[in-house]
Structure formats: C-alpha cells, structure tokens
Amino acid sequence: MNRRWALLGMLALLSMPGAAAAAVQACPEPLRAGQALALSQAVAMALCADPEVEAAWRTQLSSQASMDAERSAYWPTVQGVARSGRANRKTRYDGFSEANSTLDARTSSYGLDLSWVLYDFGLRKAKVESARQLLNAASSSRVEKIQEVVLNTSKAFYQVQATGALLEARRSIESLAADSLKVTTAKHQAGAGEQADRLQAQTTFEQAQLERVLAEGDLATAQGALASALNLSPSAPLRLEVLNDPEGQEEAFMVSVDALMEQARLTHPSVERARAEWSSTLARAEAQRAEDRPRIALYSSYRHDDTPVEQVASRQQIETWSVGLQVTVPIFDGFLARRRARAAEYEAGAREQDLQRAERAIALSVWRSRQTLDARTRALAISRRLVGSASQSHRVALGRYKAGVGSIIELLNAQNDLASARQRRVAAVVDWYTARLQLAADLGQLGQQ
C-alpha cells in the first residue's frame, strides 16, 4: 500500500505544469551503504536521471511560452519613436535674392503609436486555442514519457527481485540435493544402498550447483541493468526490498479493471496527445479562415516635432495627436488564406485518423493485458497449491527412501518436482506483478499502482 501511494504521489507531482522546482526537490538522496532500495525510490531516481523526461519537460515549457505569446495579441501594442539631429536648409530664389532663407538648427521629434485590435472574427481566439491544444499534447507526451520510465524501471526492479528469488530457490534446491546426497552416501557406506543411487544423487547435486551459479550470473546482470537505469555504475551494489507474496491482492485489483477499460480510451496519455493534436489542427484551420476576415482596431498617435526641416524654414515646434477606429478589410491575397485553411483542414483529417488509431490500439492493449493478468492470477493460485503438494510429496519420498521402501528414482523425481514447483512459484509471483504493472500502464493509471 505504501508503495502504491508513493508511486501515485511521485507521478502526480511530476505531471503538474509549473512544478519544475518541486520536481527537482522530489529527487531522492543518494543511496546509503547497505540501504534497502524501495520501488518508489528507484522510480524517482530513474525519473531524475532520464534525459528524455527532462527534454519532455522543456518541450512543455516551450509550448506554454508559445501559448502565452499568442495571448499577447489581446493586448494593445505601443511603440515609441525618437529622433535627434542637425538640420540645414537653404532656399534661393533666382532674381529675388531678398527672399532667400537659410535654416541651420537642431531638429528632433518623438512620438507614441498605439494600436489595439478590438475585433477580428475569432482570429486570436483560434490561434490561442491551437497553442493551448499543442500545450496539452506536450503535457500528455511528458506524462506518457514519465509512465514509460516508471514502467521500464519497475520491470527492471521486478526482474532483480525475480532473479534474486530464483537464486534463493536454486540455493534451496541445492540444499535439498545435498541432503539427498548425504542420505544416499550414508546408506551406501552402511551397505544398505546402491552405488548407482549415490552417483545419481551426486549428479543431481552437481546440476543444482550449476543452476545456482547461472542464477548468480543472471542476478548480477539484472542488478547492473537496474543500476544503469538509476544513473549508477552497473557494478554498484544494490539491495532491494523483498518482493512480497501478493496473496489476497489479486481479486481486489481485478474488481475495478472493467470500469477502467473504457476510461483508458478517453484518458490514456497517448490518446489525449492524439486528441490534442487533432484539436490544434482544427483551431489552426479556423485561424487561417479568420485571416481572410475584416479586423477592427483602435488606433492613437502622438507626435512632437521640433523644427521639422521638411516642413518649415525657421524653428518651430509642432504637436500632433490623433485617435480613431481603423477597419482593415482583406480584398485579395492570391487565395493564400483560403489555401492555408484547406491545408490545415486536410491535416486535421489526418490527425483525426491518428486519434482513432490510438483509441483502437489502447483498447486492444488493455484487452490483451487484462487477459494476461487474468491468466497470471489463476496461475498464481495454482502455483501456491503446487508448491504445497510438491513439498508434501518430497517429504513422503524422503521418508520412504530412508525407511528402505522407496527408490532413489522416486526421491529424485520428487526432489525435481519440488524444485520445479518453487521456480514456477517465483515466476508466477513476478509474472503477476509484471502483468498488473503492464495493465496499469495500458490503462494510463500507472501512478495508481
């Protein structure tokens, strides 16, 4: 339960727009020597170390800035202009020199221009909506990437636990084989057993040793892969929390799956991203159509000119102020706006097909994962009973062999059956956790694991 809420909190925190500082603070402290690594801590370390998660976050920030830039069109624009310089102007009249004039003075001017679009038939609204949907798409892509890292890290975490549990099972099998070898050796030395029985037991013991050595290598490989995902050296020693037996959790998780299957088609990050991209192209098409419509703007202008040489022959100061409404009506642009709108409509059609494909893919993935989890849940219960019956069979076979009424073949078969049952139990537990994890990812509810 603690693991579930820790993952949920981490995913929710990292999915919140504007939570950059919080995301940095969420990164855990470095592992201390001998510290047991929890799944939630492993996921947090992987999220902090993954460069694609950081890139997705930067992309989302860029989309947010682009939407804010489009919103700026609702504000007026004010522009100031200032000039200063020297002016020299000479005027000559042929035959009438008395009217000649000369101006040599400093000239300057400054002014302000204000323009405020009051109505544009939805142009600004469409552009803001297109940018907002692109932001939604970037946010969904980021959540999708986060969930991918959570899924891959969790699988690597479970793989280490699985190989560790399998190693313990192999050690237990080796111990059983050693006990059988001791029994057959003792009977042979006492003259009550056959040399062939001892040799068969010896062979089984050596096979168990071989399997244990291979399991140790598999565990080292799995630990190296997990350490690399956590941005640690592959040789870094890792000690993971023990994988608990999921007894009693199976049906509790399965109860809510059917209701979530339809929800996945509506809320999965990949579907939300496809839907946002489709909505963005629709809004962009509307913006292109609005480019071909009139615009109404408020304008105002103020000018202060000191000795404008192009207007006067002597120094004077001129102030000009104006205010009014300006109507701009596009008449002909070579069909540019219309053709751009048509191109955006075609693109919107393509994005709609992407949305439908994403919905179908998610529905199929959920169905497959549900069937897998269903089978793994049934296998989990069977494997539990299998270990019990195999353990009882081995005890009976060992007792019969010690009593001299059972054969070495019967004992070794029972021992192999118990070994196989324990290995299948380990595989069943890990497969159940992995199937549950995959189903949660396909439902878009990975943070609720």
Image: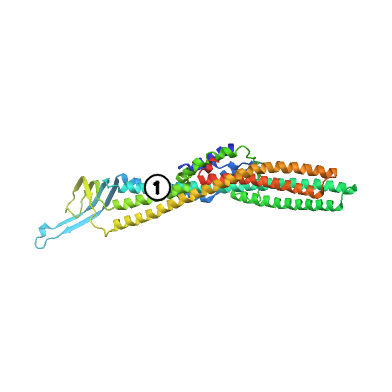
Seen as rendered, the residue at the extreme left is 95
Work out whether residue 261 or residue 112 is closer to the camera in this orientation and state it. 261
Q: Position of residue 118 (x, y in %)?
A: 26, 44
SS at mark 1? helix
Q: Is residue 91 visible?
A: yes
The type of colouring in the image is: rainbow
Say which residue appears at 28% left-offset and 48% top-offset.
80
Say which residue appears at 32% left-offset and 50% top-offset.
286
Residue type highlighted by circle 1: Gln
**Which quarter of the rendered picture does the N terminus lie within?**
top right
Seen as rendered, the residue at the extreme bottom is 94
Q: Residue 168 sits in which quadrant? A: top right
Seen as rendered, the residue at the extreme right is 191
Left or right, 3 with respect to 108, comes to right
Using a 10 Å C-alpha cutoff, classify the residue at mark 1 as few (fewer than 14 neighbours), some (14 to 19) or many (20 or more): many
Q: Position of residue 259 (x, y in %)?
A: 49, 40
Q: Is residue 438 visible?
A: no
Say which residue appears at 80% left-offset and 45% top-offset.
179
Tag count in the figure?
Answer: 1
**Which quarter of the rendered picture does the C terminus lie within?**
top right
Q: Position of residue 362 (x, y in %)?
A: 49, 49
- Residue ID for mark 1: 133
Q: Position of residue 61 (x, y in %)?
A: 44, 47
Work out whether residue 404 or residue 273 is closer to the camera in this orientation and state it. 404
Left or right, 377 with respect to 261, comes to right
Say which residue appears at 48% left-offset and 51% top-offset.
361
